[in-house]
Image (spheres, rainbow, N blue to C red):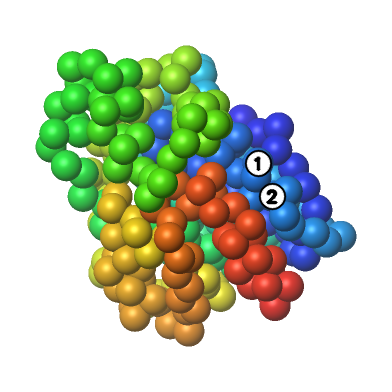
Amino acid sequence: MLGSVTHGAPHDVVFVHGAGGNSLLWGRTLHFLSGDSTAVAVNLPGHPEGEITCKTVVEYAEALRSLIAESGLRSPAVCGHSMGGAVALTLAIRHPDALGGLILASTGARLGVDTKLIEGLSDNPMRAIENIITPWSFNSIDLGLGREARTALSVSNLPVFLNDYLACQGFDVRGDLASIAAKTLVVCGDKDRMTPPKWSHYLAANIPGSELYFVKDSGHMLPLEKPEALARVVQAFLAGL
């Protein structure tokens, strides 16, 4: 389940993709990191293919905990995008000793999912990906970015999309944010329609001592749309751990 995307970084860090994604989401962002420690992007169970063994965010968080233990990294920071942010939040709440820092990218303390998307993924997942998820995910997208975005999705295992969005629908840790002790960075695109900026404001207001940063002119797929801008913020945060 470890991904193929690794790079140098200022501090050991594990990157976690969102619903229906895979580790390739982080390739462009990791390219702009540097340092003597290790950044690794992981594939959650069933991504981009394989058996779907996790049905809830909590189960994904437990799987991530095992991945970190297997990686040999010691108290890495964990950076999660969208559902990956929910997984990272859950890990920070349930197993605070497992991570040395927390980066929450384009996510929220509760991830409500539009019923139109759930229905679309139930009826025709590929059409829902093309007609709902992709248009909602970018502020601006061209053909090249669209092709790259497709490689960062687990289209070889379409049932995982509905599975993941149902997991997101059941996620809510609003009552647990005050217990998070990890140093935390919250970052979001200012044009994000999937997890709007007000969700990041809420995270920053309720996680003690957290930092908040918005990337200009970016939608939900921040690691693909504005990788260099995201990497600059992450690099500085990791250097301060």
Q: Is residue 56 above or below residue 32?
A: above
Residue 222 place in picture, x, y as percent: 48, 52
Asked if disc 1 and disc 2 are in contact, CB closer than 8 Å, the reply is: yes
Q: Amino acid at mark 2?
A: Leu
Seen from the viewer's position, the closer of residues 225 and 111 is: 225
Residue 76, image x, y percentages: 67, 59
Quadrant where the C terminus is found in the figure: bottom right
Where 125 sits versus 190, above or below?
above
**Which residue is drawn at the image coordinates 41% and 31% (left, top)?**
20
Tag count: 2
Q: Which mark is residue 27?
A: 1
- Three-letter amino acid code at the position of disc 1: Gly
Report the disc number at residue 30.
2
Disc 1 is placed on an element classified as helix
Task: Describe the element under mark 2 as helix, strand or loop.
Answer: helix
Tell me what residue is drawn at x 60 percent, y 35 percent.
24
Picture coordinates of residue 40 (x, y %)? 69, 45
How far is mark 1 from mark 2, CA to CA? 5 Å
Q: Is residue 140 left or right of residue 181?
A: left
In the picture as drawn, the residue positioned furthest to the bottom comes out as 209
